[in-house]
Amino acid sequence: MPCISKTEKWAAYHEAGHAVISLEMEIPFSSVAIFPAKDDSRRWGGEVSPVTGHRSRMDRTQEMYYAGWIAEGRARGCRYFVASLHAEDDIENARARFLGMCVHPPTKEQEWVHWASVERTVKRLVKEHWPEITAVAEELLNKKTLTMAQVQGIISEKKGGGA
Ligand SMILES: [Zn+2]
C-alpha cells in the first residue's frame, strides 16, 4: 500500500525517510518511488518496494515504518509532529510488528511508553541523517524512482563529500 502525502515534496521526504532509515537498520529494499495518487490527483503517493522473501528484525522494522512520517514532519516544519496521530498504514504496520513481538498483550500504558520511545529514537535518527534524507528526497523529485543501489550511492557521496 502506498503512503499518501499532500504535496510531491512531502511525499519525497516521506519516502526518503523510509529509504535512508531502512538502510541504517540494514533492511534491504528493491526501489523507492513517488507518483501522483491514483484516487486523488491533488495528492502524491510513494512506496518503498520490499525485497521479496526478506525477513528483517521486527524491532528495526518498526523504526523504518515510523521514519516516513517523522521525515515528512521535519520537512513540513512541524516541530511537534507526532507520527502516531497520522493513523495511516505505516503506523498500523509498525503496531502489528510490535504486537507480534509481545508474549502478552501490552497494556495501554505499556504501548504508550513503547511508541514514545520509538518516536524519540526515530526523531534522533532522522535528525542525524537529515543531509542524506534531503539529498535522496531531491533526487526522488528529479527521477521519481530510485533503486537501492542509487540511494546507497547518494548516501555515500553525501557522507564522503564532507564539509
Ligand atoms: Zn510511509
Image (tube, grey):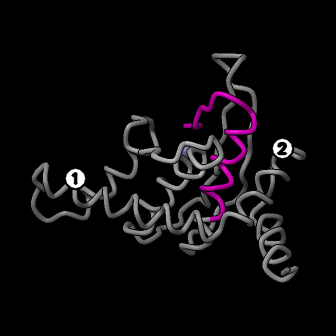
Q: Position of residue 150 (x, y in %)?
A: 83, 64
Q: Residue at x 63, y 17 (%)?
A: 39
Segment tinted magenta in the rendering: 1-20
Q: Which mark is residue 74?
A: none
Q: Position of residue 76 (x, y in %)?
A: 63, 40
Which quarter shows the C terminus? bottom right
Where ligand 1 lies, by image quadrant? Answer: top right
In the rendered image of this protein, does residue 91 appear above or below residue 127? above
Q: Position of residue 17 (x, y in %)?
A: 62, 56
Q: Position of residue 25 (x, y in %)?
A: 53, 73
| SS at badge 2 | helix
Mark 2: few/some/many CA within 10 Å (<14, 14-19, 20+)? some
Amino acid residing under circle 2: Leu
Q: CA distance from mark 1 to mark 2?
A: 35 Å
Q: Which mark is residue 112?
A: 1
Amino acid residing under circle 1: Trp
Q: Is 25 displayed left or right of 112 in the figure?
A: right
Mark 1: few/some/many CA within 10 Å (<14, 14-19, 20+)? few
In the depicted view, which residue is nearer to us: 148 or 91? 91
Q: Residue at x 15, y 58 (%)?
A: 110
In the rendered image of this protein, does residue 3 appear above or below residue 114? above
Residue 15: in magenta span: yes
Residue 68: in magenta span: no
Q: Which residue is mark 2?
A: 141
For residue 102, which quarter of the picture? Answer: bottom left
